[in-house]
């Protein structure tokens, strides 16, 4: 399982546009083959900073999504709303305590 976190800073007047686009596409992203989990987080102190947190079956599954028309359409629009360059990283869970 691959955990993917993407941190995005939006222009303050574009936050609503981002949220509407995310809402329109979240079910398609979540149901993409290989995606097992999807969350949207908002920074507690900076209301224009959001993070997506997702689980992917494998790096190959994530790359298939990144090569898809769905990703290309969502990301090409999302990029127009940024105030700063996004950061993304992949990780694997080592341990979880109940």
Image (tube, rainbow, N blue to C red):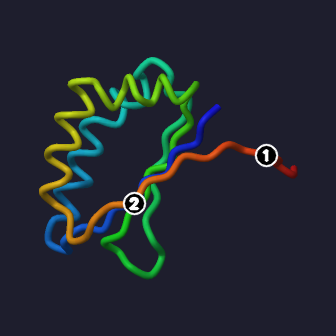
Instruction: Work out whether 73 lies above or below 58.
Output: below
Q: Which residue is mark 2?
A: 87
Real-space CA distance between mark 2 and mark 1, rounded to the nearest whole angstrom: 22 Å
Left or right: where 85 falls relative to 41: left
**Percent position (x, y) of residue 8?**
34, 62
Instruction: Work out whether 39 lies above or below 56.
Output: below
Q: Quadrant of residue 82?
A: bottom left
Residue at x 49%, y 46% (from the top left corner): 39
**Percent position (x, y) of residue 11?**
18, 71
The outermost residue toward the top is 33
Q: Mark 1, residues whose alpha carbon is within 10 Å: few (<14), some, or many (≥20)?
A: few
Q: Mark 2, residues whose alpha carbon is within 10 Å: few (<14), some, or many (≥20)?
A: few
Q: Nearer the viewer, residue 55 or 87?
A: 87
Residue at x 79%, y 46% (from the top left corner): 94
The outermost residue toward the right is 98
Q: Quadrant of residue 62?
A: top left
Residue at x 22%, y 55% (from the top left corner): 18
Left or right: where 74 falls relative to 46: left
Instruction: Work out whether 79 lies above or below 83.
Output: above
**Quadrant, the N terminus:** top right
Residue at x 20%, y 51% (from the top left corner): 78
**Percent position (x, y) of residue 24?**
24, 37
Q: Secondary structure at mark 1?
A: loop
Of mark 2 and mark 1, the one earlier in the sequence is: 2
Q: Which residue is mark 1?
A: 94
């Amino acid at each position: 399982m691959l955990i993917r976190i993407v941190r995005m800073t939006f222009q303050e007047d574009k936050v609503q546009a981002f949220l509407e686009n995310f809402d329109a596409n979240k079910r398609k992203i979540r149901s993409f083959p290989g995606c097992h989990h999807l969350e949207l987080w908002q920074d507690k102190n900076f209301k224009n900073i959001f993070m997506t947190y997702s689980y992917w079956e494998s790096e190959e599954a994530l790359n298939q999504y990144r090569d898809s028309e769905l990703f290309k359409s969502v990301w090409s629009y999302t990029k127009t709303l940024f105030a700063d360059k996004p950061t993304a990283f992949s990780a694997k869970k080592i341990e979880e305590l109940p």
